[in-house]
Image (cartoon, rainbow, N blue to C red):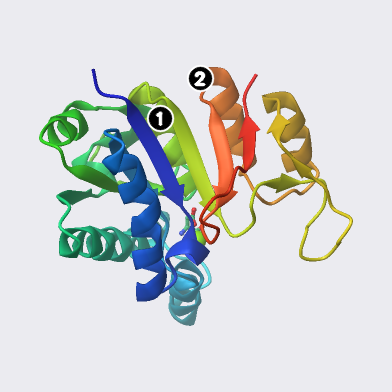
Amino acid sequence: IMEIIVQKFGGSSVANTDKLFNVCKHITKEKNKGNSVVVVVSAQGDTTDDLIKEENEITEKPNKREHDVLVSVGEQITIAKLAMCLQKQGYEAVSMLGWQVPIITDSNFGDANITKIKTGKILKELKTGKIVIIAGFQGIDSNSNITTLGRGGSDTTAIALASALKAKKCEIFTDVDGVYSEDPNKNENATKFDKLTYDKMLEMANNGAKVLHNKCVKLAKEKQVKIIVKSTFLEESVGTVVEK
Ligand code: ASP
Ligand code: MG
């Protein structure tokens, strides 16, 4: 029986080619243990912000459908590059956009909610031994329109996939080694939590802890998905476990 693990890497973790190769280490470590690995990635660095700036050069009031077509582009670049990095290292990998999975959402452009994920194609690829790399933040509505899930939405993609695939865990890689009481870059007395309940994490997300998107914590609580927040840049990061 395959144990499925979902790993999510945010924009700062995949910001350039060196960082993409760094991410490969975390992925292949789980793959080498015999796990089936599904990876969710964000757009590289400031790509999404840059796309929005370029959009604003055209209009401050973009058509909502076209806004989502534009801002979803960054993740397509990341999935292709990451698949190539893994292939270069001798691993079989395949990229998928939201519509290719498909990740089905409502039609609330810019802040869509996932209504269903069809897991057949992912499971088929995993069975052949491939690492599956999925674009975060995007889906497709019932009229084949591309949708996006709201800024920071790749976390939500990862949790929704972990739930749909009945994954053992969902690892969220970021630039800090877990969830802290305060921003550890600003306050040296900030303490790290080893373990948090969904409710405590939600309380902190509402109070501005930027580590996890609040929508994603709610979804994790509802679906009882175990989240592990850990550092992309440390070899051995224990991180923070968020569960009930
Ligand atoms: N790239 C999107 C954003 O910057 C989604 C994400 O990073 O999770 O909001
Ligand atoms: Mg981003």
- Residue 244 in sight here: yes
The residue sitting at the left extreme is 128
Q: Amino acid at mark 2?
A: Lys
Residue at image mark 1:
162
The residue sitting at the bottom extreme is 57
Pointer 1 local density, CA inside 10 Å: few below 14, some 14–19, many at least 20:
many
Q: Residue at x 54, y 50 (%)?
A: 236
State which tag comes first along the sequence, 2 or 1: 1
Q: Position of residue 135 (x, y in %)?
A: 33, 51
Pointer 2 local density, CA inside 10 Å: few below 14, some 14–19, many at least 20:
some
Judged left or right of residue 58, residue 60 is right
Mark-to-mark CA distance, 2 and 1: 9 Å
Judged left or right of residue 118, residue 183 is right
- Residue 65 in sight here: no
The secondary structure type at the circle numbered 1 is: helix
Q: Residue at x 37, y 21 (%)?
A: 166
Q: Position of residue 234 (x, y in %)?
A: 55, 58
Quadrant of the rendering where the N terminus is positioned: top left
Residue 223 badge: 2
Q: Are marks 2 and 1 in contact (CB under 8 Å)?
A: yes
**Residue in the foreground of this view, choosing between 80 and 115:** 80
The secondary structure type at the circle numbered 2 is: helix
Quadrant of the rendering where the C terminus is positioned: top right
Q: Position of residue 54 (x, y in %)?
A: 44, 79
Q: Is residue 135 above or below residue 52?
A: above
**Residue in the foreground of this view, choosing between 171 and 121:** 171
Q: Residue at x 48, y 62 (%)?
A: 13
Q: Amino acid at mark 1?
A: Ala
Tell me how many marks there are.
2
